[in-house]
Amino acid sequence: MIEIYVDTEKEKQELLNQSKYIHDFVKIIKYKTKKGKRKEKWVGLDSDKAGGLMHIYMNPEVIIVRSEPEFCLEMTPIEENDHHMTMENFIESCKCGGFTDDDGWGNHATETEVSNIPIFPSDTYDEFYNKSYSHVVWYNK
């Protein structure tokens, strides 16, 4: 049996909606030959792709939304050798190029503990990080 895995219910619904319109995947391409003659060519799905879409349409249960395992936050004490810094210092270091995604990654932290929530330098460009943490522990690759 075919199984198609998607990440969200929205993706599943989009795929099901697309499978309803299998006939819309055919179009006419108009072109000129080298001799200037006008011609038309029908372009559509090959039978394998058409069959796959039809199978999805007739059997929507083959689309499975992945269930994400529950995230379990873990906090551990900061160790003596950890590269521990304030979030402000981390962001400034990222902005000036001191830390890049190629260099490594960090984990969100507090003054005394490090979490298992990662943070990458590129996360700071769009402020895509958890602002409730005051510190970062950095890990070089």
Image (tube, rainbow, N blue to C red):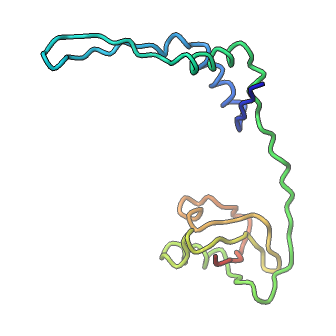
Q: Nearer the viewer, residue 96 or 27?
A: 27
Task: From the viewer's perspective, tell me whether residue 16 is left or right of residue 43.
Answer: right
Residue 14 lies, with reference to residue 95, above or below; the image says above
Q: Residue at x 57, y 75 (%)?
A: 103
Q: Residue at x 78, y 21 (%)?
A: 61
Quarter of the image that includes the C terminus: bottom right
Quarter of the image that includes the N terminus: top right
Q: Residue at x 54, y 71 (%)?
A: 100
Residue 123 coordinates in the image, percent (x, y): 59, 62
Task: From the viewer's perspective, tell me whether residue 53 is left or right of residue 58.
Answer: left
Q: Nearer the viewer, residue 26 or 84?
A: 26
Extreme-left residue of the structure: 35
Residue 128 coordinates in the image, percent (x, y): 62, 58
Task: From the viewer's perspective, tell me whether residue 74 is left or right of residue 37.
Answer: right
Residue 102 coordinates in the image, percent (x, y): 55, 70
Extreme-bottom residue of the structure: 80
